[in-house]
């Protein structure tokens, strides 16, 4: 049975920079997204082909949902690049983590007298570093967009105010909650993807034929749902942050 490791394994180094198997698959995800984007842009037509039709349908659905949350198509178009990028990046990385060979193709390395199997690729979201970094990008983006929409003073007055002691205390709690959201974001995505990876590893080790297929399809659905949840929670936080109403 393949050893299950919470920590992403090191593959090689570029100078002092360590490249892990999760980071390597993240880079491949970026390449896949850039390739799809290039192909769609290169072959744009008035009568769309299959790839353009699929992408247009998905973008229209995302844009429609964003408009219902933000209440304005203008706002939806403004924040579409961020939300769509998060959604597609997380979804594609989750699905690539389920591809044949991910977690099973690797090399054996000697460690403390033991021969350990090190997979070359690993689902990015099964690495806590990946999910924390993505959560930080999401929450920093939320606050930057809020500053651009409301101004620095108005946005941060929701956290730091001297109007009265009660509002000051509530504002500090809200400021702390911004960091709590990062933890919540990262552990939600990591927990679901890592648990799915462990489940598939165990099932394949016990019954390596047709039995794992239903679990594989379940993980494909989970990969989509986790991407949707991550992107939509980011959208909801943006909607709350850029609101012109007084938060208190």
Image (cartoon, helix red, strand yellow):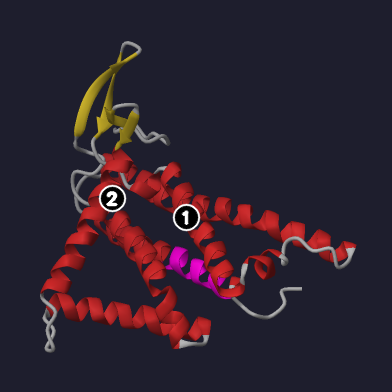
State whether residue 158 is above or below residue 116: below
Indicate the secondary structure of the residue bearing disc 1: helix
Task: Specify few, some or many for label 1: CA neighbours under 10 Å numbering under 14, 14-19, or 20 or more.
Answer: few
Where does residue 208 sit, x and y in percent of width and height? Answer: 22, 44
* Residue 98 in view in this figure: no
Residue pictured at 24% horizontal, 57% vertical:
213
Residue located farthest toward the right when viewing the structure as drawn: 165
Residue 97 is labelled as 2
- Residue at 23%, 49% (x, y): give it: 28
The main secondary structure of the magenta stretch is helix
Residue 235 in the image: x percent, y percent?
49, 71
Measured along the vertical axis of the image, is residue 26 above or below residue 57? Answer: above
Residue 25 drawn in magenta? no
Q: Quick check: 211 left or right of 197? A: left
Local SS, label 2: loop
Look at the image and give the residue range highlighted in magenta: 228-239
Q: Decide: is 16 above or below 34.
A: above
Foreground residue among 129 and 242 = 242
48 or 43: nearer the eye? 43
Q: Quadrant of residue 207?
A: top left
* Numbered mark located on residue 247 in the image: none
Quadrant occupied by the N terminus: top left
Residue 237 belongs to the span the image colors magenta: yes
Disc 1 from disc 2: Cα separation:
21 Å
- 221 displayed left or right of 143: left
- Front-lying residue, 112 or 232: 232
Query: What's the mark number on residue 137?
Result: 1
Residue 243 drawn at (x, y percent): 61, 78
């Amino acid at each position: 049975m393949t050893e299950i490791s919470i920590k992403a394994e090191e593959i090689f180094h570029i100078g002092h920079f360590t490249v892990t198997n999760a980071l390597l698959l993240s880079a491949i995800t970026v390449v896949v997204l850039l390739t799809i984007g290039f192909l769609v842009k290169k072959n744009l037509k008035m009568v769309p082909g299959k790839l353009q039709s699929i992408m247009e349908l998905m973008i229209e659905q995302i844009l429609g949902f964003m408009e219902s949350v933000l209440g304005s198509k203008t706002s939806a178009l403004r924040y579409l690049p961020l939300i769509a990028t998060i959604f597609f990046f997380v979804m594609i990385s989750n699905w690539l983590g389920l591809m044949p060979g991910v977690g099973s193709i690797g090399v054996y390395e000697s460690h403390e007298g033991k021969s350990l199997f090190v997979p070359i690729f690993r689902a990015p979201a099964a690495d806590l570093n990946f999910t924390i970094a993505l959560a930080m990008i999401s929450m920093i983006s939320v606050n930057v967009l809020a500053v651009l929409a409301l101004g620095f003073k108005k946005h941060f007055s929701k956290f730091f105010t001297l109007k009265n002691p009660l509002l000051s205390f509530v504002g500090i709690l809200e400021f702390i909650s911004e960091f709590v959201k990062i933890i919540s974001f990262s552990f939600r995505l990591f927990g679901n993807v890592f648990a799915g990876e462990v489940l598939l590893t165990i099932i394949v080790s016990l019954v390596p034929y047709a039995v794992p297929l239903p679990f594989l399809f379940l993980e494909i659905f989970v990969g989509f749902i986790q991407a949707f949840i991550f992107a939509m929670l980011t959208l909801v936080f943006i909607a709350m942050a850029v609101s012109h109403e007084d938060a208190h």
